[in-house]
Amino acid sequence: MPWCYPNPWTGNTKRVRKVLALLLVLALAALTAATTASAREGSRFHPAVETRLGIVATESPAAAQVGRDVLERGGNAADAAAATVFALNAARPQSCGIGGGGFLVYREANGRSDSIDFRETAPAAFTPDTLVPPGLHKTFTGHLTVGVPGTLAGLDLLLHRYGTRSLAQSIAPAAQLARRGVPVEQSLSDSMAANADRLKLFPAAAAQFLQNGEPYPAGSILRQPDLARSLELIARKGTRAFYGGEIAQRIVDDMHTGATQPGDDHKLELGDFKAYRSKSRRPLVGGYRGRTIVSVPPPSSGGTTLLEMLNILSGYDLRGLGPSSADELHFVAEAQKLAWADRNKYVADPDFVDVPTAGLISPRYGAQRRAEIDPAHAQTYEPGTPPQSSSHHKPGGSPADTNPQASTTHVSIIDSRGNAIALTCTIEQEFGSAVVAPGTGFLLNNELTDFGDPGTANEPGPGKRPRSSMAPTIVVQGRTPVLVVGGAGGARIIMGVVDSVLNVIDFGYDIAHAVDAERTDDPTGTMTIEDARIDASVLDELTARGHTLARVGEYDIRPRVQAAGIDPRTGVRSGVSDPRTDQATLAQRYRARRSR
Ligand code: GLY
């Protein structure tokens, strides 16, 4: 007889029943402990916002309200994104606006994906040596650092392709915020204080963002009438008011009359504005453990680096190793250094440089690079030779990005129909170049400081776009966008996205835990590590393997991630803002009466 013990559920032995019940309780307790250990919540953990309608994740409460409002009036994800970004110009002016640029990935509910590059562009007079001599630009400040802004052209293209509302409708809420005023968040007040000395170099910037030379206190109201006028002008006359008209003229006039600080210089002319185009580019598509990853192509390095890392990591059982185990952190760090060496050498503006994009993101190349990893020792790596790389690649790589302050912001939106957008916009570091051309009301970017040294693929050039780290990305499971993600924080952005993707796919975290979890970043041999939630034995083991650790405590200040996603089983949408920044994720509360 195969079953020789009394059956505990029907049998007669109370003692066996008790033992089994105890075992069950212990097993459940162990399971709960394991789950908690694998997603140890930080002190700032926030649960996700959930809905069956649309969701807007940003790091600006005022801008998120504008985006949600558009969804509630029947706009789609593209409409909501455009209005949200214009609103960010008024409410989070230190990070994003029509004086800057960015990248987006849009995925329609029918499964078609697109990406738009609205990166800033160097003036025609820019040469590889322009940024070499000493000057104000070495402090990431002033007129020479300003590229032709792309945000307005990018949003206009987005609305033309996918939107249902006009540019004027999309701008109206932002113009109202600028005219009536927005509450100053603590983050804006802090950033005003940190940048006050730079702002004081340029009178229009100081007048707009300081009160008697001091930052606006948190909770006070910031009114920006010049910004309201610029936005209203664009709403009336369209993009030509900016690129061929009054606004470009004001900026160029300021280039000629306002670059008066010692060491300041300028190159931007009216012809550069007239020549500017946002570009639709085929998004990068890769696979990772049965999911489809859709991300941005060069000139951002975000997509190639993410996909190369995922290809390398696909050879390891990260789930089996365990999140934030020594092995998992070791393999992620080694994969990052490998992908980073390739990023630094190869990725630049593909309209000027032969970028071996397909080779960099090929699974076979990822496997080749993986073979260089020693499981027991941390290493540094040379760039590899991806398929399609040719002999005319420039020697040497651009050094790691130099601006430690780089900022930016990100918006993730899903609408009730399932259209999804991941959009990252920037004026480079907080407060950009610190220049506001008188009468315009918006900050000009300092994006040209994202160029590398002369002689590298990412060297400056006339009409060229500097390499970016922005990584707006959509992860699709079956036909469902389960993670719509991106972040802020300059070159730190990429690992914010990589960690979020691994946490969702490998470790099965919901998006709130995925974004909250501890992060690492190891581009070239020093691992910045949010160590507070990591076991001491793991930190010791990493050091023993040769990793140099820069411990930053529980939460670093960047990268700052925004995420949304649809649960493929239930259709419920959830969204979350990174605990490292302002909480501004909002769910659509009701369906529009007339949905378009
Ligand atoms: N300026 C930030 C980036 O483009 O990555």
Image (tube, helix red, strand yellow):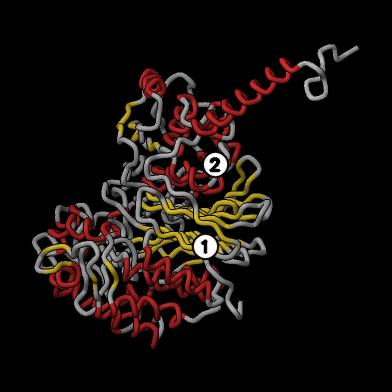
The answer as to whether callout 2 falls within 8 Å of ligand 1 is no
- Label 1 neighbourhood size at 10 Å, few (<14), some (14-19), many (20+)? many
Q: Measuring 37% from the left and 53% from the top, which residue is drawn there?
A: 488
Q: 126 and 360: which one is in front?
A: 360
Please tell me in which quarter of the rendered image ligand 1 is found: bottom left
Q: In this view of the protein, can residue 297 be seen by the observer?
A: no
Q: Which mark is residue 63?
A: none
Q: Nearer the viewer, residue 355 or 362?
A: 362
According to the picture, the residue beneath numbered tag 2 turns out to be: 509
Q: Taking 324 as reference, is 189 left or right?
A: left
Please, what is the three-letter code of the amino acid marked with disc 1?
Answer: Ile
Extreme residue toward the right, this view: 1
Residue highlighted by disc 1? 55
Quadrant housing the C terminus: bottom right
| Place of residue 58 in the rendered image (x, y in percent of width and height, measured from the top left) | 42, 60
Q: Quadrant of residue 17?
A: top right
Q: Amino acid at mark 2?
A: Tyr
Instruction: Note whether 550 is above or below 210 in the view shown.
Output: above
- Other-residue count near label 2 (Cα within 10 Å), few / some / many at <14 / 14–19 / ≥20: some
In the figure, 474 relative to 222: above or below? above
User: Which sits in the foreground, 591 or 452?
Assistant: 591
Question: Is residue 532 shown left or right of residue 373?
Answer: left
Q: Is residue 592 above or below residue 483?
A: below
From the top left corner, tell me how far across and down residue 594 is, in percent: 61, 80
SS at mark 2?
loop
- 121 sits left or right of 478 in the view: left
Residue 509 in which image quadrant: top right
Q: Is residue 280 visible?
A: yes
Q: Residue at x 60, y 36 (%)?
A: 364
